[in-house]
Amino acid sequence: MRTVFDTTDPDTNAYAVLTSVVVPRPIAWITSVGADGVGNLAPHSFFNVACARPPVISFASVGRKDTLRNVLATGHFVVNLVTEDLRDVANASSAPFDPTVDEAEALGVRLEPSERVPVPRVADSPVSIECTLHSSIKLGNSHLVLGDVRTITVTDDALVDGRPDIELLRPMSRLGGDAWGLSPEVVRMTRPERP
């Protein structure tokens, strides 16, 4: 037996089902600055790599949130990694703050200048991905944002043999409802060669 969730039925909460089965989802903890100079810090769990060469990442804003408004107005944003020790403040930054409030300032999140974009990064996050706006697409109640990756910074203590190491990064992920995922157990498997 299977339960059928008919997404064409207006009574079906497709969002709840999708966010419970498309898991775990990485979290883009995005810093942006509006045209008015007010900073914004918000987590987005509809986030992924869109292209490898050139490097492009994507995130979706469900609804027209401050992050989306800022990115469309200025063309810049920074994705910061949410680690286990940053999870409480990252969750707190998801509250519906007034657009005139800088979440980082209100929550005491330390920011520092980025390398190439005029948007600060989260100082205590071990990874930042600095982006300029590539394009955006309106999809129903959401906007898909594509960002050209300009610079990636990783703290030296999170690198092994010159590559970021998941066991040192300890990234959080989003699951369904109020559930968040801790860093996963790592299983290493060699990719098969062409038969």
Image (cartoon, rainbow, N blue to C red):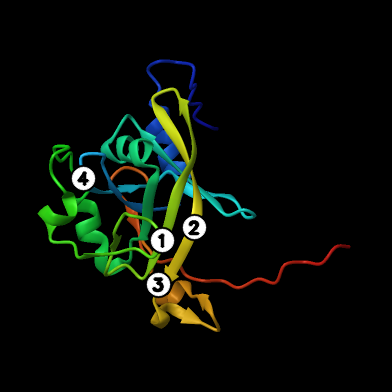
Q: Residue furthest right?
A: 195
Q: Position of residue 143 (x, y in %)?
A: 42, 31
Q: Secondary structure at mark 4?
A: loop
CA distance for labels 4 and 1: 18 Å
* Mark closer to the observer (1, 3): 1
CA distance for labels 2 and 4: 22 Å
Q: Secondary structure at mark 3?
A: helix
Residue 169: give its label.
3
Tell me which amino acid carries mark 2: Arg
Residue 116: give its label.
1
Count of numbered marks = 4
Q: Badge 4 is on which residue?
A: 37
Q: Quadrant of the C terminus?
A: bottom right
Q: Residue at x 47, y 62 (%)?
A: 151
Pointers 2 and 4 in contact (CB under 8 A)?
no
Lower position in the chain sequence, tag 1 or tag 3 = 1
* Mark closer to the observer (3, 4): 4
CA distance for labels 1 and 2: 7 Å
Q: Is residue 123 left or right of residue 2?
A: left
Tell me which amino acid carries mark 4: Gly
* Mark closer to the observer (2, 3): 2
Pointers 4 and 1 in contact (CB under 8 A)?
no
Lower position in the chain sequence, tag 1 or tag 2 = 1
Q: Badge 2 is on which residue?
A: 150
Tell me which amino acid carries mark 3: Leu
For label 3, count other residues whose C-alpha is less than 10 Å away and answer few (under 14), some (14-19) or many (20+): many
Q: Secondary structure at mark 1?
A: loop
**Residue in the foreground of this view, choosing between 132 and 93:** 132
Q: Residue at x 62, y 53 (%)?
A: 54
